[in-house]
Image (spheres, rainbow, N blue to C red):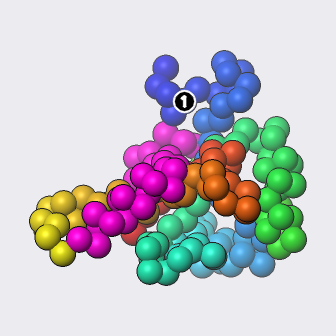
Amino acid sequence: MKTFEIDQIVKPDMSDYLIHMTSEKSFNSILNSGRHESEGLINALVPQGAKKSSFNHKIACFTETPVHAIGAFIEISKRRSSENMVYGIGFKKAFMVEEGVRPTAYLDNTTLGKLLQIKSSESLSVSSREFIDLLAPFVHPLGEKSQRQGFSWEREWCSGQ
């Protein structure tokens, strides 16, 4: 069995689905914006609250939170709760991996700062810059020293551009 196919029967804290959580308005927009009637479209955007200078990557986010725990996923996030983000669109995780969706890596402030410092270095080779730009959409702050809640509990996956 592949890692991406482990389901809740085998391991109750796992899901073989990735779910994009959204509001009713965005949910309807997704369903109505595909190329044809049987297709929807999730747009990648720069996340709300992102520091534009250090994170300007458009991403679409998904959670691997098991369906039976989605209620807690909504309740823990004040923003999701206040914006009524109670609608989810689920996809098989194995399919999403084929489409380039990857798990988010959460880095502590020091490590993330060093990555951003390297990224802004003028002496960085073109291939190194391309590699960091490829990796950057999937790297987020751990939030270990922040007053705001961190996000590692979300079990987030992203598609990056």
Residue 106 located left or right of residue 24: left
The C terminus lies in quadrant: bottom left
Residue 68 located left or right of residue 159: right
Q: Residue 84: horizontal and vertical position, in percent?
A: 86, 69
Q: Residue at x 47, y 25 (%)?
A: 2
| Count of marks overlaid on the render | 1
Q: Secondary structure at mark 1?
A: helix
Residue extent of the magenta highlight: 92-121
Relative height, residue 60 to residue 62 (above, below) = below
Residue 116 located left or right of residue 91: left
Residue 18 lies in magenta, yes or no? no
Relative height, residue 31 to residue 77 (above, below) = below
Residue 26 or 81: which is nearer the viewer? 81
Can residue 117 be spotted in the picture?
Answer: yes
Relative height, residue 132 to residue 91 (above, below) = below
**Neighbour tally class for label 1: few under 14, some 14-19, many 20 plus, Cα within 10 Å:** some
Q: Residue at x 29, y 73 (%)?
A: 120
Residue 112 located left or right of residue 153: left
Residue at numbered disc 1: 5
Q: Residue 144: horizontal and vertical position, in percent?
A: 63, 51
Which amino acid is tagged 1? Glu
Q: Residue at x 18, y 60 (%)?
A: 128
Residue 97 or 139: which is nearer the viewer? 139
Q: Residue at x 58, y 52 (%)?
A: 142
Residue 11's image quarter? top right
